[in-house]
Structure formats: C-alpha cells, structure tokens
Image (tube, rainbow, N blue to C red):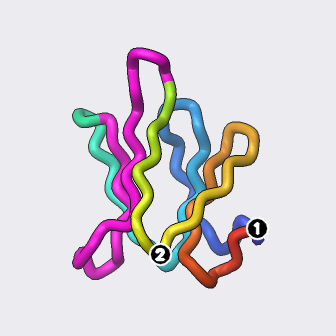
Amino acid sequence: MTEKNYRQIAFYGKNIFIDESFGFHVDEEAKTLLVIEKNYTDFNAVLIYQEEDQSIKILPRWQSHFLLKGDAIYISREGHGNG
C-alpha cells in the first residue's frame, strides 16, 4: 500500500486516505463523508462524526476495505491492495 494511490482528506482530526478509484463527498452540515463510485451510481461507505464521544462511525458497504493506522483511516477497493 502506498499513499500515492490515495487522496487524503482531513475529517474531524483524522486523515482519511481514499483509494483513487473511488469518489467522495463531504457534507459539513451533516458531519458525514460519503465514499462513492465516481459515476455517482452507488456509495461504498459512509463515515459519520459522532459529537457525543468525538469519534467517527464507519458504515461499510460492499467492495470497500478499511485499515486503521494511528490517526489515519485507509479506504481501499476490494482487490486494490489493502495492506
């Protein structure tokens, strides 16, 4: 896994690295980060900031893998090298 294959997004104190094969959308008002297909046909994960305990809840979908590494969260597509 190399960071050159990912886009980095700062999200509530965490560095989120998203596989370049995915698109994404951040909704500041709803405190969510959507990991989506680039053609907008489906979403692959939702990250939600939880104010009560200052944590990030991950709602995974098919085709996505997650790696937690310190203050970083890596999101990769199935078969794209997840570790």
Q: Looking at the image, which is closer to me, 25 or 42? A: 42
For badge 2, the amino acid type reads Gln
Please name the residue shown 33% across and 42% down the image: 32
Q: Quadrant of the C terminus?
A: bottom right
| Residue 43 at x, y percent in the picture | 31, 67
Provide the residue designation for mark 1.
83
The span shown in magenta is 31-54
1 and 2 marks in contact (CB < 8 Å): no
Identify whether 56 is placed above or below 65.
above
Q: Quadrant of residue 34?
A: bottom left
Instruction: Reply yes or no: does residue 82 show up in magenta.
Output: no
Please name the residue shown 53% across and 42% down the image: 10
SS at mark 1?
Answer: loop
| Residue 37 at x, y percent in the picture | 34, 75
Q: Looking at the image, which is closer to me, 8 or 51? A: 51
For badge 1, the amino acid type reads Gly
